[in-house]
Image (cartoon, rainbow, N blue to C red):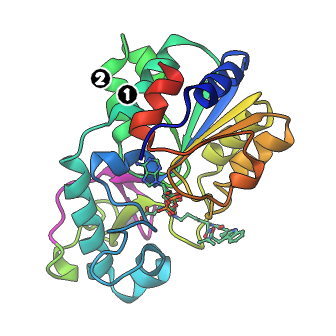
Amino acid sequence: MSAPPAAAIAAAKGALAKALRVVVLTGAGVSAESGIPTFRGPGGLWKQFRAEDLATPIAFGRDPRLVWEWYAWRREEVAQCRPNPAHLALARWMGSRPGVTLVSQNVDDLHERAAGEVARDAEAAARAAPIRLHGSLFHDRCARCDHRARGGAVDATSVATLPHCPACGGLMRPDVVWFGEMLPVRAVEAAFAAAGEAEACLVVGTTGAVYPAAGVAHTAKAAGAAVIIVDPGATELDAIADFRLQGKAGEVVPLLLG
Ligand code: BV8
Ligand code: ZN
């Protein structure tokens, strides 16, 4: 897929340059070129299961071993991946100018790793870290007492071998937001506050099908922001796009932000 016309990129670049405050929303597509399968794209299925089937408290209640096997597989997959040029361009850009808030639906840690690679100091790396709407693949929390811990290797051969809580002995679960579960309140507040005062909104690699995350783009639009969408396919947010850049994040984002 060739890159969008230079004029289209230049126009979107202009909208970003004149915006004092920008909100960026990313989805699985920004990590696709790092080798992480998207949810709805090719390879989105794990064994024969859809994400919506496994990423739910009901599925975990019914078969925690199976759900943990899926997350353990994703942890190993992501650990072998590296940030791609889109993650790196975003991190560099956020280190080079104020007023940008990065909001991600992704539970992988590639935005943080990119920030760690390009930021000149810890403060700049922290500024380039995303607001995580759906939690993190590499953290666990107790399904009973909410005790939190850094996630490690998981032996999913039986429920007895799964990670258990050092505080109450309960079963640990991945510290992610499952369908039907509330998002972390502080993350939602920070994301929608940034969207409500944005003059530009850059959307990269999301179908915009999952709520309330997709509401970040709609809130920015309603606040008068110019909406820029980077995606090779059609998205449910295309109707609110002012600049639609059809292409892969790893190719288009460096051109847009470089
Ligand atoms: C809640 C963590 C309420 C786990 C995830 C309003 C309307 C309709 C439905 C709802 C609604 N409000 C709530 C709902 C229900 C539900 C929902 O949205 N359902 C959808 C499916 C219709 N939402 C919820 O359940 C949320 N919770 O509402 O709680 C509540 C209130 C009170 C009390 C209790 C509860 C929680 C949703 C969060 C679920 N967790 N992830 C995990 O990862 O395991 S969602 C997960 O799926 C991801 O995080 C992400 O959000 C979503 C996948 O979407 P995308 O990232 O967009 O990925 P996708 O594969 O779809 O698309 C990839 C895109 O990339 C495509 O456009 C493709 O073209 C593009 N692409 C491909 N290659 C590239 C590329 N782009 C650029 N470059 C490339 N190279
Ligand atoms: Zn516990």
The answer to whether 66 appears left or right of 198 in the picture is left
**Is 237 placed above or below 44 here?**
above
The CB of the residue at mark 1 lies under 8 Å from ligand 1:
no
Hey, what amino acid is under mark 1?
Leu
The quadrant in which residue 51 appears is bottom left
Q: How far separated are the C-alphas under marks 2 and 1? A: 8 Å
Q: How crowded is mark 2: few (under 14 residues within 10 Å), some or many (20 or more)?
A: some
x and y, in percent, of residue 136 in the image: 40, 51
Decide which of 208, 252 is in the foreground and name it.
Answer: 252
Decide which of 106, 42 is in the foreground and name it.
Answer: 42
Q: What element carries label 2?
A: helix
Please provide the residue range marked out in magenta: 136-155
Q: Is residue 129 visible?
A: no
* Marks 2 and 1, the one that precedes in the sequence: 1
**Residue tagged 2:** 117
**Residue tagged 1:** 88
Q: Is mark 1 on a helix, strand or loop?
A: helix
* Callout in the foreground (2, 1): 1
Residue plotted at (47% across, 34% down): 252
x and y, in percent, of residue 98 in the image: 61, 14
The quadrant in which residue 46 appears is bottom left
Residue plotted at (14% across, 70% down): 155
Decide which of 205, 82 is in the foreground and name it.
Answer: 205
Residue plotted at (48% across, 76% down): 52
- Residue 144 drawn in magenta: yes
**Callouts 2 and 1 close, C-beta under 8 Å:** yes
The answer to whether 56 appears left or right of 226 in the picture is left
